[in-house]
Image: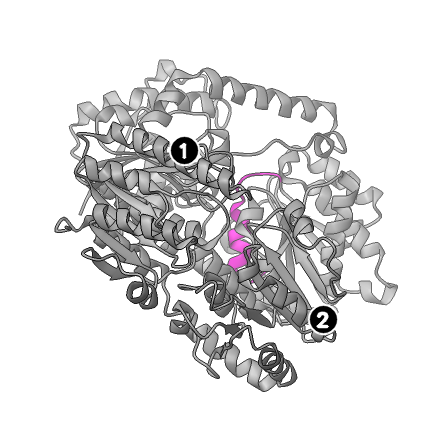
Amino acid sequence: MKTILMSAYAVNPYKGSEDGMGWNFICQAARYNKVIAVTRENNESSIRKYMQEQPNPAYDNIRFIYFDLPYWMRFWKRGSRGALLYYYMWQLALPKFIRKSRCRFDITHNLNFHNDWTPSRLWTLGKPFVWGPVGHHPRIPHEFTLGYYGIRDYFTEKIKWGVKKIFWLADPFLKSTLSHADAIIAMNKSVEKVLNLKNKNVHILPSVGSESLHTESEFIPGKFHVLSIGRFVPLKGFDVTVKSFSSFYHNLEPEERKDIRLTLVGKGPSKKILQTLVKNEGISHVVDFIDWLDRDQLKKYYSESSVFLFPSHEGAGMVVAEAMSCGLPVICFDNSGPGEFVDDTCGMRVPYGNYHSCVRKFSSALSRLFRNRDLVESLSAGAIKRFSQHFDWNAKGEQLRQVYESLEMKQIARQKNKVVCVHLLNDYSGSPLVFSEAIKGLVASGHKVDLYTSHGTEGFLTGLPVRTITFPYRFHSNKYMRLLAFSASQLLLFIRMLKYYGQPVDFYINTILPFGAAMAGKVMGKKVIYHLHETSINPPAFKKFLQVIAESTANTAIYVSHFLMKSDPLRGVASSVVYNALPDEFVDKANSFRLHKIADRSQFNVLMICSLKTYKGVPEFTDLAKRMPHIHFDLVLNANRENINRFFEGKNLPANLVIYEATNNVHPFYEKANLVLNLSRPDQWVETFGMTILEAMCYGIPVIAPPVGGVTELVKPNINGYLKDVRSQHDMQNTIHQIYADPNLCRRLSEQAILTAEKFKLSTMQQMVCDIIENKSGK
């Protein structure tokens, strides 16, 4: 059990926001570790009282110590006035106090405030240092401050933003905090961009959390109560709340308005402005203003409401978690605050646009929920589920434990070899997708990683949390130019790899192509691991050349299927089969779709996703579309529009076929597909695994694949799909029609496809790759 020293300026278990977050983070950390919590002296009485009233076994692991600056350094502070300046000074003085206290601890953690411009000096204590949750409030669009709050609030916002920029650019203490943080907890994704946290150990963990306030609410026909809670300030967007509710209300028929209400709970300087706005909109009789309440009193309003309307511009929103815990669907902006907390399973997100279009969209969302009680119930169940998975404090405690464990892994990483990962062409095809997930597993297990891949291309290897070095390479349609570019890239790779001479590194090479790195590894006596995906490489002489080099340089070969290991083994090289797996984000999105969406059966959609190659069965796919005009066909090609147009130039394409260019978001295509095809020609290209097959199965989509290769290890005929030879177009057409015409068959195949996909777990793949690379008994 580790001892965590946590600096928590604001801690009060009776309050929410910063104070409540400080208390709950301390208690959650104490579930698994000893905690020394340093806070201000004025918090002591509330902490002692609460611990007596609400006993908890975790208290045995907590020791509070109290610290304040001398009176002459704080006499000017009154309540929230001057709080940020005092906090800044308090943080700078804190390390000296801790040294004098002679506390013994393993990790330091600076908790609050939730902003991205006040530094911490805990790193000077010489222990692994965690900073955060760090918050970031994006700028409020100017028309949202000018519209109803006036020029004063507009310039106040500009001044605040200017002050932040000064700290971001010029504060040496903030720069040292960033450079010395061993782990950073970010409240939302925008923090990474603003503070340029690339290659840092960043954990997205919103400080927004709550204990469940859930109480059973009764759905009454015609009743529609809208709730919004927060400080009455421009940041919270209550003007949008009032305007959108007004538009919704006035568009209802008179008889529909009988039990429609808006309740605004809070206080703040904008209250009079909002009351005037309500009066001008003519809705005073259906709008209630309630002064700020404690959490127990709020339960009543949550339980009596139908929806939580929260068009806040902030990067947080504690009340969003509370609303979801009560099963309230949330309507918010699609931003880096509530827009990241809410997804399509529990609410609706409105993208930013001009002021009046946003009001219309919020009003439309209210109307949609008012008229669709089934949707309200579905989103209500989704809200409770999302709360329990992401915003319940116990769930956050698990996430916090992972943050601390990541520091242990970082310590272990210093004892592990760095892994130099090499892939030739970064794009959105299957092999870089698998490689990217393997790299993430290496990073999570504590390895430092250098990644070498092509320059100027976007793909699955873009933006990984590793040091990325690019080299010039691109695919040329002319075979001589392609050979020249390939040869030059391998010579350059060989030269660049020599810099690792004398360093403890392993070489992890994706596909058989980047032989320059393998040769450099062999020359320097490094361990070389190949991750092999392909077997169909032309011309045969080139394939033989690459195999000979791989056999003479590799210590270990990882194959994506037993078929590949048997058909193209590297002789004399230790071999393992590691099946591909899908990213967790992909699986989560597919699962969410299956749980909350109903497939549109009004149109049967056949999908194929592949490279723009003849041997991938592209001509056969278009021919099937011509033969079956009653079925819709979608073809997604890993190519740009120019190359697609050139390929199909002069060809007569059927009206029921739509061709799409390369994309990094294939989810919309799977969401509307009823059947997925892989039409690779067995005599020209043998699929060694088939990532699109696994992706389709994850979505519960039946598949038709070739009867040879690694796909036969996924597809079981008449169970989760069919194995058919594309050269028999008549048989292929009959099979498609059979699935199209028999919904029960389609449903049975779909259920089995889901069960198959669940066997290919990402964690298993990542752990197997790590175990192979860390095995020191290689050849």
Residue type pointed to by label 1: Ala
Marker disc for residue 253: none
Sequence order check: which comes first, mark 1 or mark 2? 1
Task: Let me know if residue 283 is in the magenta part.
Answer: no
* Left or right, 311 with reference to 341: right
44 or 239, nearer to the observer: 239
718 or 394, nearer to the observer: 718
* Left or right, 523 with reference to 718: left
Whole-number angstrom distance, CA of label 1 to CA of label 2: 44 Å
The residue furthest right is: 254
Residue 662 visible: yes
From the image, tell me which residue sits under label 1.
Answer: 488
Q: How many marks?
A: 2
Q: Residues within 10 Å of mark 1 (few under 14, many from 20)?
A: some
The residue furthest left is: 777
Task: Let me know if residue 323 is in the magenta part.
Answer: yes
Q: Is residue 60 above or below residue 519?
A: below
445 or 427, nearer to the observer: 427
Q: Is residue 661 above or below residue 653?
A: above
Residue 189 visible: no
Q: Quadrant of residue 275?
A: top right
The residue depicted at 58 percent of the width and 54 percent of the height is 612
Dot 2 lies on which element? helix
Q: Which residues are magenta?
A: 313-329
* Left or right, 370 with reference to 193: right
- Percent x, y of residue 371: 75, 67
- Badge 1 vs badge 2, beta-carbon distance below 8 Å: no
Q: Quadrant of residue 394?
A: bottom left
From the image, tell me which residue sits under label 2.
Answer: 626
Q: Residues within 10 Å of mark 2 (few under 14, many from 20)?
A: some
- Percent x, y of residue 722: 50, 79
